[in-house]
Image (cartoon, rainbow, N blue to C red):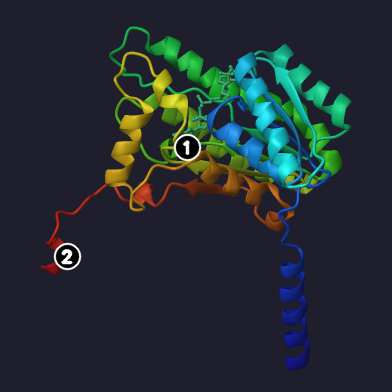
Amino acid sequence: SSSSSSSSRRNFSQKSTMSIRYDFKDKVVLVTGSSSGIGEGIAIHLSSLGANITITGRNVERLKRVGERCRQSSLSSSSSAKVLEIIGDVSKEEDAARLLNKTIETFGKLDVLVNNAGAYQIASIWDDNYMQNYDMMFHINVRSVVHLTKLAIPYLAKTHGNIVNVSSVSAQKPAANNTLYAMSKAAIDMFTKSMALELGPKHIRCNAINPAAIRTPIFNKVKNSDLNTDRMAEAAALSYPVGRIGEPLDCANAVAYLASDAASFINGVCLLVDGGSVNSALIMPEGDSKK
Ligand code: NDP
């Protein structure tokens, strides 16, 4: 029996080594919120890995620019992957349906759905427009994700595909004036973990990434605040264990892994992409460790 157990160990290691593959050739990936920031980074990176990509957002000019960068990225890695640009508001049901239908019309299938589009706003419970902010963030960050996922599931079942949601460290760590955004992302974590159970038997995996501060324009869009991306980067450099803010490519690398066949046994994971920052709120004064 010792020889049978050693041979099964050998088989096991051989299998897992052989199945590691970050190859998206002939795969079709839909990335929401890909006209900017993290979604842009994911789209460009997956194009370089050979994926056919649908990119989408509301801003025509920015989406065109990202489309060009995806095509260049695909060319420079000698892949012949295609890029489809679709203007739309993912929070509108008819736009979400069109997004999916056009993707299927063009590429014939869907392998990966990346639910990345999202909105961020600082909001205090003392604000008069608190409930407007609630509606805005829950609509785009939660409802549109659930809706697009529901539409995509029949296609993902055919390809044994997978979903990657872009959540946030905020889902796991409360902060004053960040309640609504954090609640919306906590909903995404639970959606991710629950979908992993519900869709696993249909051969659809569902995972999430939970980024800390990433250098994107999102902080410049926050209303009634002097927060901006440069200030965020400075703060991150001081307080994050790795001494820097994250970059879109940090997220794109994590998404590429989760969406690839190399992660075929990873299901229901909410992967921190945070440079260790979630666990590092307490900064000990210098010299304390010597006591
Ligand atoms: P950006 O503001 O740079 O990009 C947001 C993207 O979402 C844009 O492409 C925007 O497109 C799109 N979008 C927003 N609302 C809608 C809508 N109603 N319909 C269609 N598209 C929409 O932000 P990030 O790249 O930073 O954020 C991407 C995701 O990452 C979000 O879910 C965010 O919560 C999350 N995140 C970001 C972190 C960060 O530090 N940057 C940290 C943790 C999570 P357009 O304007 O063209 O419509």
The residue tagged 2 is 289
The image quadrant where one finds the C terminus is bottom left
| Amino acid type at image mark 1 | Ser
Q: How many marks?
A: 2
Quadrant of the image occupied by residue 73: top right
Q: Does the closest atom of ligand 1 sit within 8 Å of the Cβ of label 1?
A: yes
Estimate the x, y position of residue 26 in percent, counting from the top left. 84, 44
Instruction: Indicate the position of residue 150 as horizontal and vertical percent values.
Output: 73, 28
Label 1: which residue? 168
| Relative image position of residue 232 (x, y in whole percent) | 34, 33
- Name which residue type carries label 2: Ser
C-alpha separation, residue under disc 2 versus residue under disc 1: 31 Å
Residue at image location 76% in from the left, 67% down from the top? 18
Q: Which mark is residue 260?
A: none
Whether label 2 touches label 1, CB < 8 Å: no
Quadrant location of the N terminus in the rendered image: bottom right
- On the rendered structure, is 97 left or right of 273? right
- Dot 2 or dot 1: first in sequence order is 1
The residue carrying pointer 1 sits among few (fewer than 14), some (14 to 19) or many (20 or more) residues within 10 Å by Cα, namely many
Q: Position of residue 112 (x, y in %)?
A: 73, 39
Specify the quadrant of the image occupied by residue 191: top right
Tell me the SS state at disc 1. loop
| Classed neighbour count for the residue bearing mark 2: other residues with Cα under 10 Å, few (<14), some (14–19), many (≥20) | few
**Nearer the observer, 166 or 237:** 237
- Against 100, is 194 above or below? below
Residue at 72% from the left image edge and 62% from the top image edge:
20
Q: Secondary structure at mark 2?
A: helix
Can the viewer see residue 204 in this picture? yes
Observer-nearest of 109 and 82 = 82
Q: Residue at x 77, y 33 (%)?
A: 153
Residue at screen point 86% across, 40% down: 158
